Image: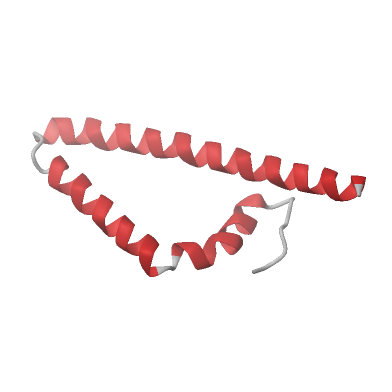
């Protein structure tokens, strides 16, 4: 695991989470969710697929933003805690 770079949190989170996202368990879960997503998506009319894809992308963006903010606050909190010790 590499050091956390508070100036480049996107790079840091990718480095820190690398072992997790490359794990067999994570990849199996991704494959299962992708199968469910595309199985359901294929039942929709083409116009509804576009809306469904947009909805899914927006929901993912919200989750990504939340995770990044939590990560940034964790860096800030971790630094402030280490200064207080």
Q: Is residue 39 left or right of residue 19?
A: left
Viewer-closest of 52 and 67: 67
Direction from residue 21 to residue 79 in the image, left or right: right
- Image quadrant of residue 23? bottom left
**Residue ranking furthest to the front:** 85
Q: Residue at x 74, y 51 (%)?
A: 6
Q: Quadrant of residue 74?
A: top right
**Position in image of residue 16 (x %, y %):** 60, 61
Which residue does the image show at 72% across and 64% down from the upper left?
3
Image: 55 above or below 7: above
> Which residue is depicted at the point 91% across and 49% down?
85
- The quadrant holding residue 2 is bottom right
Instruction: Pick the quarter of the image with the N terminus.
Output: bottom right
Left or right of 22, for residue 42: left
Tell me the colour scheme of the image. secondary structure
Q: Residue 62 at what x, y percent from top left?
A: 46, 34
Which residue shows up at 61% across the image and 38% down it? 69
């Amino acid at each position: 695991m590499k050091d956390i770079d508070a100036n480049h949190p996107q790079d840091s989170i990718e480095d820190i989470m690398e072992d997790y996202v490359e794990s067999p368990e994570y990849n199996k879960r991704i494959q299962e969710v992708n199968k469910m997503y595309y199985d359901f998506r294929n039942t929709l009319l083409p116009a509804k697929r576009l809306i469904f894809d947009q909805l899914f992308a927006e929901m993912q963006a919200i989750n990504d933003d939340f995770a990044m903010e939590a990560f940034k606050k964790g860096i800030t909190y971790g630094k402030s805690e280490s200064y207080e010790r």
